[in-house]
Image (cartoon, rainbow, N blue to C red):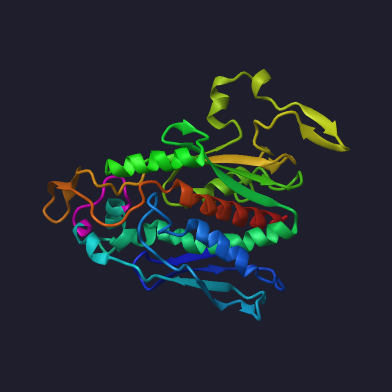
Amino acid sequence: MRYTIFGESHGPCVGVVLEDVPAGLALDMDFIRAMLARRAPGNGPTATARREADEPRILSGVQDGVTTGAPLCAVIDNSDTHSSDYSELADKPRPSHSDYAAWVKYGGHNDVRGGGHFSGRLTAPLVFAGAVAAQILRDRGVTVRAEISCLGGEQDPSPERVREIILEARGELDSVGGAVRCTITGLPAGLGGPDFGENIEGELARALFAIPAVKGVQFGAGFGFAGMRGSEANDPFRVKDGRVVTEKNDSGGVNGGISNGMPIVFECAFRPTPSIGIEQDTVDLRTMTDASLTIKGRHDPCIVPRALPAVEAAAALTIVDIIQRG
């Protein structure tokens, strides 16, 4: 399913147009709201204090709760915006944020308030669209589930440890990065292909890198393959209950860009949030001189917990698209 996300962090709303939605799908709004709630801001001290209802308003493509087959358009209103917090950023770009690159590309007309179109706020309509896709997959017996696999360098931290790591960074006016592991189960072997546009790994990576702050994607053992021999890396085949399986799954469920029937497993690395309270070196674009910047406003000290449904959404949309294309 093709989708277009629109809006800015501090504009009237953010939204999505989702095409090729099959007609006759009764939308499970409770499921959609639950997925949006996992991404929502304002859920405690480990996230930004910005509070939004994140209630989707469907403008087209649905009648009496059932999809019509026409493009599905939904918007999510923005209400809790503090735009004045970003006034200094028009001239002083945040290090490692999109501010400077967007300033160059768009001739200084980019909206820096809350990050504009580059904000994590744009993952709200992504999650809405992904929840629709996840419902389609659910009806086919396919599940997509993400979990925190690393935070601040610690592997598979407990929920309590996640909280401690994030609060420690926040207390030091800093931020912390991490990784998300996602598993897709229930897919048959034979989906996808080797070439651009159909390769499962390539299509998933393309969707995942569109999520703000994703800086790395690996499948199965990923970069671990670089230190292995073939005898360690290969996944031996076996027949179990009449179907071909592998003894392990270092390939992450994909061979040659095609699903092999095992769970598809990948990880995304998320960089620490660039908006931190520590004074940083930058430039003044108005005077073209070196400058310093202390960022104000409400920012996540870590986006990884709120990124879980965004990763699931990007994966679900990609897999539905691959299934529909055969």
- Nearest the eye: 107 or 7: 7
Query: Magenta stretch containing residue 90, yes or no?
Result: yes
Q: Report the side of 127 relative to 168 (left or right).
A: right
Q: Where does the N terminus fall, quadrant-wise?
A: bottom right
Picture coordinates of residue 72 (x, y %)? 58, 72
Q: Report the side of 119 relative to 232 (left or right).
A: left
Residue at 58% x, 40% y is 266
Q: What's the magenta bit mostly, secondary-structure-wise?
A: loop
Classify residue 28 by image quadrant.
Answer: bottom right
Classify residue 219 by image quadrant.
Answer: top right
Q: Where does the C terminus fall, quadrant-wise?
A: bottom right
Picture coordinates of residue 214 (x, y %)? 45, 45
Report if residue 284 is visible in the image. yes
Above or below residue 12? Residue 289 is above
Residue at 45% x, 41% y is 162
Q: Report the side of 247 relative to 268 (left or right).
A: right
- In this rendering, the count of numbered labels is 0
Above or below residue 255? Residue 83 is below
Report if residue 269 is visible in the image. no
Picture coordinates of residue 99 (x, y %)? 29, 54
- Nearest the eye: 8 or 272: 272
Picture coordinates of residue 284 (x, y %)? 15, 51
Range of residues picked out in magenta: 89-98
Query: Magenta stretch containing residue 18, yes or no?
Result: no
Residue at 46% x, 32% y is 154
Outermost residue on the right side: it is: 242
